[in-house]
Image (cartoon, rainbow, N blue to C red):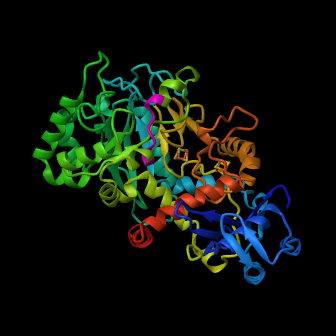
Amino acid sequence: MSTNKTKATVPVETPSGNKYLYDRKLKKSVLAHPILFFLARLKAKGDNINDWFDSQTGKTIDIPDAGTFSKEEVEYYIRKLQFLEVSGFFKEIAQDKILTRKLNVDAITTVLANLRQITFELTDSCQMNCYYCGYGQLYNNYDSRENKMMDFDTARKAIDYVNNQVNSSLNVSHKRDLYMGFYGGEPLLNFSLIQKIVEYVNQLHWEHNSIRFTITTNGLLLDKYMDFIKEHNFNTFISLDGDQSNSEYRVLKNGEPTFDRVIRNVELLKEKYPDYFKERVFFNAVLHNKNSVEELFNFFKKKFDKLPGILPLNTGGIREDRIEEFKKAFVDQAESLNSSKDYTKIEKEMFVKLGMIQSVTNFMFSSLDFWYDDYNHFFTPEKVPPRFPSDTCMPFAQKMFVTVNGKILGCERIGHEYELGWVTPESIKIDFPEIVDKYNAWHDKIRKKCQVCYIFNQCSQCMFYLDLTKENPVCDRFKDFNAYSKYAGFFFDYFEKRPGLFDRILKEVLIG
Ligand code: SF4
Ligand code: SF4
């Protein structure tokens, strides 16, 4: 096998002892008899099955972990293996021929013309000092926080630029929502700018889009500004980590807890605008060692009849000297969910809001031979389109994020060193050829690893969380043949234990 090819068929065993052969190229899986499973593993090791059979001198053959079988039985499964082989199993995947996509200027221009969201970091100031804040003590990949306020001129330049791009004929959407997002620090500390932006955006002509507003707030100033927020029908995301003790990390600069004040404001909003609250208010909770999936579920369900979005602690840009502290605070969502008393109920109600179900869904869609990415794929399913290495979105595919310093980034979750451009006092500077060169150089750094990674077409790794300053960045999610076999086993087990899950994902996620 060439060094850049991976084996398409992977033997997969679940903890209940069921065995499968899962073909990553055909996107098919078959239940396998233990003999067939054993033979497939021999084949994967590179052994010649006929030579192995000829070397068996006794009347019966011992198959490890399966038992003793007659030669006729084993021959039957050798024929079955050969049948699978002529049916397309056991081929190789030339990942080096697939992970060849290069970014170009046309692709970025098209993505930008179809932008879905522009988010403004209206200020880097915040009344709170949350222990785990991505702009706080545990991290070092952001521009220094200096209590700055974005001015209207910066926002207006970015809006005009976007307005120009999305009004172009390259925008193929018909009145699709384009979100204007307000983010911080705490965006309500710069409320006058929110007012100006809303007024300005509403008087511009948007040829192909409907404009919607969205805000992420810590809730401390909601009592003051809720009328405006409701009047303009904002999608409001309130950050809260559960009940009083769950929210211990969310404190003011002087260390005082914030829970009571936030809850008072949220209840006020609910009382004053019940319909708006029901439709447009959402909660984002960060999972850490002071709460759990179960506590979050119970708290938001009981208190507000809502299901929270549950976010992990940011794993990019952690300071070397704070890694141990970070590890103490970090909690894996799947582990937390598993330790819930009422696991089934939580999973049933939260469903795609859970990271676990999102991963299962991703695995499922990429493993089905009747799932097509687009019309081209539908008409020529054998043609595998070239891909970028990793799962990093294209520049502006998720959003345009404008920092308080006028830096333009692909999203708010990545380090500030990955800027795509600047809002300068004179204009907007986005140098497309420069972005192309940068992205292609970063992709080149991880391409080799991705070419031999078995998870390459189910990857969920953003390259900006890897250390791209290194010549060969390390990716902890890399999977070789054996690791992938275990990884797939986990998902097969997940489906085995939940007979209705496959159907529910098809109905609720795919068909919606
Ligand atoms: S984290 Fe990475 S992949 Fe996700 S939106 Fe940001 S840049 Fe894109
Ligand atoms: S998991 Fe890491 S090594 Fe594997 S394809 Fe994704 S980015 Fe590449």
Q: Residue furthest front?
A: 59
Pick whichever, 136 or 379, lies toward us.
136
Residue 447 counted in the magenta span: no
In the image, is 220 to the left or to the right of 17?
left
Pick whichever, 328 or 202, lies toward us.
328
Above or below — where is 331 with respect to 386?
A: above
Pick whichever, 67 or 366, lies toward us.
67
In the image, is 420 to the left or to the right of 54?
left
Residue 453: x, y in percent? Answer: 70, 53
In the image, is 474 to the left or to the right of 397?
right
- What residue span does the magenta drawing correspond to? 328-334
Where does the C terminus fall, quadrant-wise? Answer: bottom left
Q: Is residue 256 visible?
A: yes
Residue 329 counted in the magenta span: yes
Q: Is residue 173 visible?
A: no
Residue 147: x, y in percent? Answer: 39, 20
Q: Residue at x 84, y 55 (%)?
A: 3
Pick whichever, 370 or 439, lies toward us.
370
Residue 137: x, y in percent? Answer: 46, 21
